[in-house]
Image: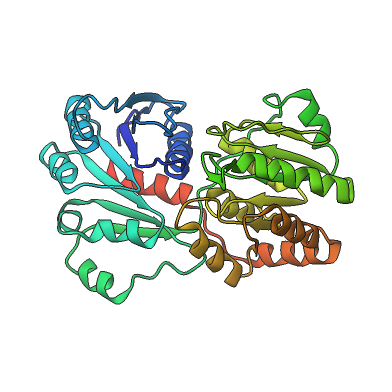
Amino acid sequence: MNPSPFILFIPAYGKGGTGELVRCVTLATAVTRRWPQARIEFLLPGGPGTLQQAPFTSHCHDDDGTSKEQFNNREIERLRPALVVFDGGIRPSSLALCRRLAIRTAYISHHAKARRKAFRIGGLQQLDAHWHQRDADDGALPPLLRLLDGFSTTERLSFDICLATAPSSSEDLPAEVLALIAAPYVLLSPGGGGYRLNGQWVGDLFVEVAERLHAATGIACLTLLGPMHEGSARTRHTLALKQVSPGRLVALMRQAQLVVANGAGSMGEAAAAGCPVVAAPLGAVDQPARIAAYAAAGRVQPAEPTLESLTEQALALLDPVRNAQQRQQLAEAKIVDGIPLMCEAIARLLA
């Protein structure tokens, strides 16, 4: 394949969420590691409450009178990449355009509704690859989708999580954080931080949980507020950062005694990193079902999104016996990382 492929990523997200963007950034970073000369660009959504930051060349929909679908199609035709990777949303018109321009296409989905989009008429006939991130299950297609798949030439694969590669050094962390993580600590990660519960930013809620955990046990706590956090985050005896890179997040999870997370990417990443995790739904409608699936598989301790419940469950999972049991369960779980699988799939698509 071309050693410098041009890949365009189009994550569909908004309303406080960032999971699709983070997943695409993680994959794009892995692509540049494998193909250092690759050209990577992003098409990002616009509007209030939407994160418009990516560590790659990005083009943002500025609501210039066009729909996001029209914007995507205009930019695809202008840029002419070798491959377009859609995440979370896909339109038949975009697939038809890519097919006409001989552009390969891939679609990443994470929940049942998003997965069904790949089985629409346009997807069945024109989508080259479909990569599904499952929720603590085997990813098997339900009967109707299995029937429809028989009429499709789309290459499909499924996996559990997308893990970023941890950095080799800690130079990106402030000195006070380096001092904190030198001892046992709890990591609190509410995800993108763009949601509010009963008027309170989820990052502020997690800071309150951190302060209570420290008061009850003396353990150090670090809260990652999220790039979309706009609250006050009044720390007294714990530390808080706005955000870290996806790779640094994985490294912090691997070292932590416990992770307190949302029911999206942070929860799955912590489980894959082998760290006991307490998870609560923090806004997105798909999080309760995902937490339930992970809990049924023995990978997380569920909690309600309240100060009392999160603190109670975190204290319980800090118990040395329960903590060790949970670590053993996670070590025995066969959690599949999708990043190397998708990189191999890209190589096949562009061969």
| Residue 255 in sight | no
- Residue 9, given in percent of the width and then of the height, sits at 34, 36
The answer to which image quadrant residue 62 occupies is top left
Chosen colour scheme: rainbow
How many marks are shown on the rendered structure? 0
The vertical placement of 42 against 126, above or below, is above
User: Which residue, as the protein is rendered here, is positioned at the far front?
Assistant: 198
- Pick the residue in front: 107 or 222: 222
- Residue 5, given in percent of the width and then of the height, sits at 32, 31
224 on left or right of 199? right
The answer to which image quadrant residue 132 occupies is bottom left
4 on left or right of 216? left
- Quadrant of the snapshot with the N terminus: top left
- Pick the residue in front: 258 or 171: 258
38 on left or right of 127? right
Residue at 13%, 39% (x, y): give it: 97
| Residue 80 in sight | yes
The answer to which image quadrant residue 204 occupies is top right
- Pick the residue in front: 217 or 320: 217
- Residue 25, given in percent of the width and then of the height, sits at 45, 36
The vertical placement of 35 against 282, above or below, is above
- Pick the residue in front: 317 or 141: 317
Residue at 15%, 54% (x, y): give it: 122
Residue at 77%, 61% (x, y): give it: 317
User: Which residue, as the protein is rendered here, is positioned at the far left?
Assistant: 100
- Residue 351, given in percent of the width and then of the height, sits at 28, 42
